[in-house]
Image (cartoon, rainbow, N blue to C red):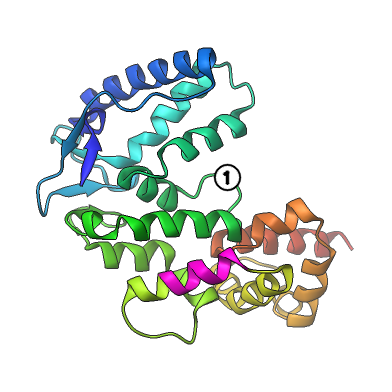
Amino acid sequence: MQLPSFLHGTYRSVQQKVKREGLRCAEQYRKEGAFPSPRQLLEVPLGEVVVVQGVVDIQHERPVWRLYMVSEVLRDVWEALDWEDSSSVRDAYEASFLETAWGALFFTLARMGAVSAERTARRLEAVLRFWDPLECARYLFKKPGAAQTLEELMVDSCGWAMDAWSPELEGPVRARLESAAKRMERATREDCLEAILRQMPRALAAGHDLKHRQVLADPAFQRERLTMLDTPSFERVSGACTSELLEKLYDWDHELGLQ
């Protein structure tokens, strides 16, 4: 697997390099409406650790691969463009680099923008295309010092997608993700609704301070509220991502408190 050279080094050096990369990307995007390819790609040695979440990056003086810092490239692009049409800029950046191993993994883990069924399918399919090279590295995601295989990483980060979209399938993670991605890709609104309802108990379990839990736990209430959502609002939760559903539960909980 190859990663852009600006993602490797100490925390400070990567910060400096991604700043320069962000400014370079912004300049070309402003001129041409497209992003340049990274100037240099480096091969990640077999078994090397790639940090994919900033929260576990606690050894700042250690030269490592810091994939999560792609988000800083985007932030610097947005700043250089005065935050103009930031959603379109983000989508254009994703479209430019989703067909790379590093871009596929970053955007799948970062879950930027609405986590719709269509967008999630596209991201998972990209990761699956690069599965073999991505398997060559190990990843720091939730716990400092606890490097994970690609399979372990995808279970921790995308287990919700497998639970919601291929609950009956057992076996290798790769096969379950393939099944989930295919179902998401061709899902109707009703398919999405059923996947959301399957995932709602997990979202409820994560909402420790919900005040109207009994009402919120009623599938009939959930279905009614989901059916009432306009297209953009439904699109946002259509992937059945637990965190997006939890946010929606808190919205409903607040509305119930006003009645």
Instruction: Locate residue 241, reporting x and y percent.
Output: 55, 63
Q: Residue at x 64, y 26 (%)?
A: 85
Q: Which residues are magenta?
A: 178-186
Instruction: Identify the image quadrant of the C terminus.
Output: bottom right
Q: Residue at x 66, y 70 (%)?
A: 192
Q: Secondary structure at mark 1?
A: loop
Picture layout, residue 253 above or below residue 94:
below
Instruction: Locate residue 189, reporting x and y percent.
Output: 72, 68
Q: Residue at x 61, y 49 (%)?
A: 114
Pointer 1 residue: 113
Left or right of residue 204, residue 171 in this image: left
Kindly indicate the quadrant of the structure image that contains residue 21.
Answer: top left
Kindly indicate the quadrant of the structure image that contains residue 216.
Answer: bottom right
Instruction: Locate residue 124, reporting x and y percent.
Output: 44, 59
Give, as a three-letter code, the residue at label 1.
Gly
Front position in the image: 82 or 39: 39
Q: Residue at x 49, y 66 (%)?
A: 181
Picture layout, residue 208 above or below residue 6:
below
